[in-house]
Amino acid sequence: MIDLSVHDRGPQHLRVREFYLGRQPILDRNQALFGYELLFRNAPVGPAQVTDGLTATAAVIAHAAQLGMEKTVGEAQGFVNVDASVIMSDIFPFLPREKVVLEISNGMAATPAVVDRVRALVDHGFSFALDDVTGETEAVQALLPLVEYVKMDMRNIAPSSLSKLAPRFRQEKKKLVAEKVETREEFKHGLDLGFDYFQGYYFSKPVIMSGKKLSPSQLAVMELMTLVTSDADNPEIERAIKRDVSLALNLLRLVNTPAVGARQRIDSLSQAVTILGRRQLQRWLQIMLYAEPSKRGQSMTPLLMLATTRGRLLELLAAKLRPSQRERADIAFTVGIMSLMDTLFGMQMGEILEQIPVGDEVRDALLHRGGFYGDLLKLVECIERIEDMDCHILPTLRDLAMSTEELLELEMAAFEWSDNVVRYAL
């Protein structure tokens, strides 16, 4: 049995509570969710400078059991950055090896001790990735036989180098991950080069198509939402649901997810409408706008995951900040869900808001990121893009009078809720 502990080498006395977490999706060639890269950032206390996140990562991961890796990544793989100090530390008994891929940071010296330690961890069932590979350096050559994944930044490497390196690593039977994929064209280019996985937010960028109409199923959901918000009576709502068989089945599937928390199984539409109430019914209809198209090859699953996570996190933030105003949380959920409808429908947000009546505060948040809900939406968008926008998170948290620990707890709850919805709804 290999000893996973290396005593007295790990980072000491790190404050494990003072950090925040980003989670970036990694998709496969069919655009289905494969994993998440987990990005930990230290939060400075008082006037202290932000320290390098990697050493703090060791202390944070050491509490993975407490954080709950299942809550963080669900059924996906979790990619976590590590450097030499982390690799040589004694955190590994805390990590679920079947759920985690350890990303060796760019520029790390591949000393004999580090290479031996990586080899021992691989023998013990851990998987590794080489991050931000731009060429065949000595470190890459030393570690390549031990890693399962090679990650290349689509924006940090010349196309000519990319075209040479991709086939070379594929020849070595490595799984290729394209990072910073921000456009559909970059995704297509990565497909052509034989990349296996894609990390970035290209799938959440709206591709505007002039004159695009809603699909029949989306139209049915929208019409039902109009009935719900206009206080139509329950029998009329039930009749509208029954007119669309797939809508009825999807709704029953959704209302029986653990996320709803119903005490008994809901078997009839009448039960669903009565037990859920208008507020919850509207919420599940909003989710179904994303869930229904995903049956076509599962390609919308990441967008569904992102939208439900956003909606839930905005709701939890609003409930925390305005505990006496329940309607604030409901509106915040709607803002989060609707913030990606331009991508879902391939239409300008302004055009969508002409078809879906919303209040002025919701409109201001969606179009201009203005007001209370706009501030929450900006915070969540910064967390999603933590690599580029982490400097905006702490000032926003200060403005909201919220601690990083409180934010982390809400994030975990939103991740878990969203994972339940997507896992059981499709």
Image (cartoon, rainbow, N blue to C red):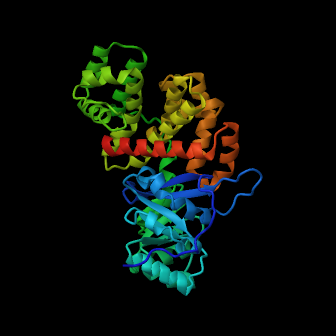
Residue farthest toward the right in the current orientation of the protein:
47
Q: Position of residue 265 (x, y in %)?
A: 24, 31
Is 302 drawn above or below residue 249 in the view shown?
Answer: below
Mark yes or no: residue 181 visible.
no
Which residue lies at the image location 52% right of the left edge and 23% below the top edge? Answer: 327
Query: Image quarter for residue 149?
Result: bottom left
Q: Position of residue 246 (x, y in %)?
A: 26, 34
Q: Position of residue 291 (x, y in %)?
A: 36, 40
Which residue lies at the image location 51% right of the left edge and 33% below the top edge? Answer: 315
Quadrant showing the N terminus: bottom left
Is 280 drawn above or below residue 348 in the view shown?
Answer: above
Quadrant showing the C terminus: top left
Judge by depth and name the residue closer to the eye, 110 or 403.
Answer: 403
Is 162 drawn above or below residue 65 in the view shown?
Answer: below
Query: Image quarter for residue 13?
Result: bottom right
Mark yes or no: residue 117 visible.
yes
